[in-house]
């Protein structure tokens, strides 16, 4: 991978100002920052696929110039972002929201027979300087906050076009207004496909050998889709598996995490998208557990306190029971109350 060109512009819609920063003549830390940013964007897993609306849009035309070795359009891209941010800020001001001042990073990379173009906006943060304790603004070095766009060209044609956003929710002004892109997969398609594949390719394979872990992990997954507005692969894995302690020690947790992480690329859906509520219904997320040949337990949605609501119980004679905490259901079975000795409790 060969970096042919990089540029960095400060974009401040408050001051209506664009200023280019000379990366080559700046500190080693800034150079390292830009190199790390390229790595994070090119290797990122939380992304959404888009297409160019037209091959003649302003940004797309500049990217064609980049591939020909003409990088003068870098300033036009920065000025375009400034105008878009000013217009967007005026439209959302009444909501109390504010677009952060930031730096626009652009890069042209050669990767074999491919041209990769990266455009990223890293938000600046305010901090107290440890030397003089004055309030200053700068780029977040360790935990970067950025919106990014990456396109891979082959023979001058866009083959892959992705948008990233570390804030989970993709900013519409970034991909729609500034970059003029169209989504490849709708929110409805992404939500429906993700739910279906999580069950068919991951959870169902756990059900027979690791039933207790299957119930808990799937319950966490359903809870994520029912409580979040956005799906983002990293946050999903954090909510479901990263810190999960298996009931069965043989559960291949690392392999399951990797399998889930690879689902979007393997089965063609996005790893970051708005969750479509109408696709997260009882019919789609409910699960059925066979208790006897005449009784099934149907879980219709996420149970927040699963462990204290449904429990397994083994008596002194190794007879197995399911105990369900319920006020309404109790009335139907109170005549069949199970006597539990103190030892068994």
Image (cartoon, rainbow, N blue to C red):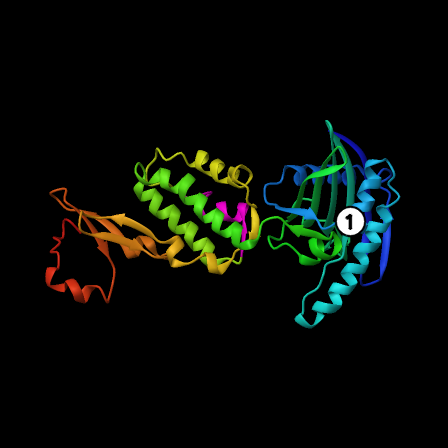
x 14%, y 64%: residue: 334
Figure quadrant of residue 8: top right
The span picked out in magenta is: 230-244
Secondary structure type for disc 1: strand
Q: Nearer the viewer, residue 60 or 22?
A: 60
Q: Is residue 241 magenta?
A: yes
Residue 149 in the image: state x and y as whole percent: 70, 46
Residue sitting farthest toward the top: 112
Q: Is residue 111 left or right of residue 298?
A: right
Residue 103 in the image: state x and y as whole percent: 77, 50
x 55%, y 45%: residue: 269
Q: Is residue 116 magenta?
A: no
- Tell me: residue 74, above or below residue 256: below
Residue 86 in the image: state x and y as whole percent: 78, 63
Q: Residues within 10 Å of mark 1 (few under 14, many from 20)?
A: many
Residue denoted by label 1: 104
């Amino acid at each position: 991978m060969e970096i042919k060109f990089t540029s960095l512009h400060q974009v401040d819609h408050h001051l209506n100002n664009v200023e280019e920063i000379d990366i080559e003549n700046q500190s080693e830390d800034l150079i390292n920052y830009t190199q790390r940013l390229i790595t994070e964007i090119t290797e990122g897993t939380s992304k959404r696929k888009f297409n160019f609306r037209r091959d003649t849009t302003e940004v797309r035309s500049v990217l064609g110039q980049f591939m020909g070795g003409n990088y003068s359009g870098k300033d036009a891209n920065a000025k375009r972002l400034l105008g878009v941010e000013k217009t967007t800020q005026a439209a959302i001001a009444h909501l109390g929201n504010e677009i952060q001042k930031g730096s626009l990073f652009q890069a042209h990379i050669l990767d074999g027979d491919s041209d990769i173009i990266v455009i990223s906006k890293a938000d600046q943060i305010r901090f107290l300087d440890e030397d003089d304790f004055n309030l200053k603004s700068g780029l977040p070095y360790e935990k970067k906050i950025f919106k990014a766009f990456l396109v891979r060209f082959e023979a001058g044609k866009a083959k892959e076009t992705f948008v990233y956003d570390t804030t989970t929710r993709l900013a519409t002004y970034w991909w729609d207004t500034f970059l003029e892109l169209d989504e490849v997969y709708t929110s409805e398609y992404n939500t429906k496909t993700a739910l279906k594949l999580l069950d068919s390719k991951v959870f169902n394979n756990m059900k027979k050998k690791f039933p207790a872990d299957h119930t808990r992990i799937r319950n966490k997954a359903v809870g994520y889709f029912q409580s979040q507005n956005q799906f983002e692969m990293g946050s999903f894995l954090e909510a479901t598996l990263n810190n999960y302690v298996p009931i069965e020690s043989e559960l291949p947790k690392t392999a399951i995490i990797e399998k889930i992480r690879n689902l979007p690329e393997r089965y063609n859906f996005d790893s970051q998208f708005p969750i479509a509520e109408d696709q997260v219904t009882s019919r789609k997320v409910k699960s059925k557990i066979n208790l006897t040949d005449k009784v099934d337990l149907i879980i219709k949605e996420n149970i927040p306190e699963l462990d204290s609501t449904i429990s397994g119980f083994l008596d002194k004679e190794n007879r197995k029971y399911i105990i369900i905490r319920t006020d309404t259901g109790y009335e139907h079975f109170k005549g069949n109350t199970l006597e539990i000795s103190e030892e068994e409790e």
